[in-house]
Image: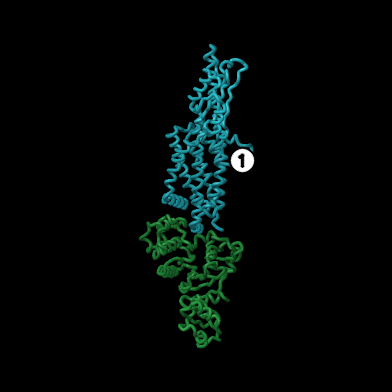
Chain colours: A green, B cyan
Amino acid sequence: MYAIEVNNLTKSYGEVRALDGVSFAVRRGELFGLIGPDGAGKSTLFRLLTTLLRPDGGEAKVDGLDIVKDYLAIRSRVGYMPGRFSLYPDLSVEENLSFFAALFGVKAEESYDLIEPIYKQIEPFRTRRAGKLSGGMKQKLALSCALIHRPSVLFLDEPTTGVDAVSRSEFWDMLAGLKQRGITILVSTPYMDEASRCDRIALCNEGRILGIDTPADIVSNFNSRLYGISSERTFALLEAARAQRGVVECYPFGECHHLVVDEQFDVAQFTASLSDFNDLVIKQVEPTIEDMFIKLMKR
Amino acid sequence: MRTFLVLFQKEFLQIRRNPFMPKLIIIFPIMIMLLMPLVMTMDVKNVNVAVVDLDRSTTSRRIASHIEASEYLTLATTTAEFPLAMQALEQGDVDVIVQIPDHFERDMISSTAKRISISANAVNATKGGMGMQYVVQTIARTLVELRGEKSPIEISELVTIENRYNPTLNYRHYMIPALMIILFILVCGFLPALSIVGEKEVGTIEQINVTPVSRLTFTLGKLSPYWLIGLFVLTVAMIVARLVYGLAPLGSVGLIYLGAALFILVISGFSLTIANFSETMQQSMFVMFFFIMLFMLMSGLLTPVDSMPLWAQHFTIILPPRYFIDILRSVYLKGTTLVDMWQNFAALGIFAIVFNTLATLTYKKQA
């Protein structure tokens, strides 16, 4: 049985189609990632699944319950951490925690074993106002509050946006720990490098899902040779490389450009025709999820 | 029940933590009650009078001295030339001109007597009108006095005046209940709306919406702190009215609290409803302001409902403060009992139910 089943879900805001026929299913105990840029419809999907919005069409089930008919029952079974920090900034850490516990009709202590690995890191600051916490600590508090009623499904909308690299990595360790306890987690992120921490990922763009697979399989389906090229004259190189024979795609990728090529491509010929870039470096690289994303998006 | 208590407690905690709110709740009523009654007065004082004395008799001098002695009138100048007085009126130095004609004293008893003429500057209609009246009264009193001295027969005054319930016609006693209502409208009308829209802006309402908390519990949790704050504000205002202006209710204090308890529910339910339809603070504030103008200017707080045009009088039926001002003024000044005013309480009760039901129904946990 699936923890989340989404079938052809659509949602529009006026003229704008935020979700355009999205379907996927998340297994119980799975850590499932929604990867995509801003405006891909990730937050809308979260708001639909947490019953904050009603869909225009299609259907979805969370924990076996319909998001339209059984919305009340869903609310006590899911935990939701919105993209924006939305706890009470003028209440302290422990006040926020016991407030949300009470709203769900539980006592904070009853769930302590579940949240302990996360909460103990912010416990020294339990009397501090939530608004005065650092980004990483806010995120840990928000996660603790989302877990306080022992939800079976956890929705995390861009939990690591605006958080430093170390805290981000720690956060994914915490998610792995929660997964161990059987909680199904749906998490969205605009950072492709975080995708590899998920069991499976869905690449989404402009309200559609481009592909769903494990991070490893997504990459192995790339099926093209990929080179990284670099030179001092970055922009000129990008223009020149795009004009060469056998080059399907050339796009900036961090410090170098990534070059997607077909079978007509020849490295020697490529270097020869770009001889005026005397510092040109070209080497074959392994494709990443981001390369796959760009490939699917262009298709 | 436990959920309600938690929401209630959280709301109070937030108010207390706010660096500005607790001060506002205490200082605001004291300031309004201390300051406003002093400046909001319809009593006209310092009316400048010019006497154009063409008669130059004992009578005319007596009139002038009585004007000078009056609490409300100031004798600005005495002259024998009307144009001079008129010039002063045009320059704004004088508000009322009294012209006493030639041979006024001599002809006073005959039927052909020339009349005293009074001209007033009525640009400020209240000051002109009231000033004129004071002058007429002063002159009439002087003449009665003079006649009494001349004729051995005692002439009694034909009209006697008594102001019931507010014997000294103290405008402050009339205004203080209105000020209390204005306080409720400002404190209990604005704060709940700001609190809800604030949660929308910060995003915390979204976190509440994914919990199983019911709409009614949430609305009650938002409402009740302001209910208590409103009653606190009333207590402060009543104490100030008693200590500073010596105004204590003639009727039962319990009735005042009962009316206030209902009225605060009405006004905060109204405020919550507006907040439910607003996305931003500006939006909710602007809409609230519009209604507060209606409430303040049309409910009979400042001007009597009875002197409005008939259509406006009918319109006031849907303005809740109208009922509460009736209750407050009657209990404070007349000592009216519940039996005589149950309709006002019933109206407030109905409004309380309607607005709070609306507030609950329009609060959407789902878009």
- Which residue is found at the position 37% from the left and 56% from the top? A127
As drawn, B253 above or below A159: above
> Is residue A282 visible in this depiction of the protein?
no
Which residue is outermost to the right?
A: B311
> Is residue A22 visible in this depiction of the protein?
yes
* Residue B26 image position (x, y, % from top left): 43, 43
Crowding at dot 1, Cα within 10 Å, few <14 / some 14-19 / many 20+, comes out as: few
Element type at mark 1: helix
Q: Nearer the viewer, residue A213 or B319?
A: B319
Quadrant of the rendered image containing residue B293 = top right
* Residue B196 image position (x, y, % from top left): 50, 52
Quadrant of the rendered image containing residue A118 = bottom left
Q: Nearer the viewer, residue A280 or B160?
A: A280
Using residue A132 as the reference point, say whether residue B346 is left or right of it.
right
As drawn, B2 above or below A182: above
State how many labels appear.
Answer: 1
* Residue B81 image position (x, y, % from top left): 55, 25
* Residue A128 image position (x, y, % from top left): 38, 57
Which residue is outermost to the bottom?
A: A268
Q: Nearer the viewer, residue A211 or B170?
A: B170
As drawn, A49 above or below A238: above
The amino acid pointed to by label 1 is: Phe
Q: Which residue is mark 1?
A: B315
In the rendered image, which quarter contains the C terminus of chain A?
bottom right
Q: Chain of mark 1?
A: B
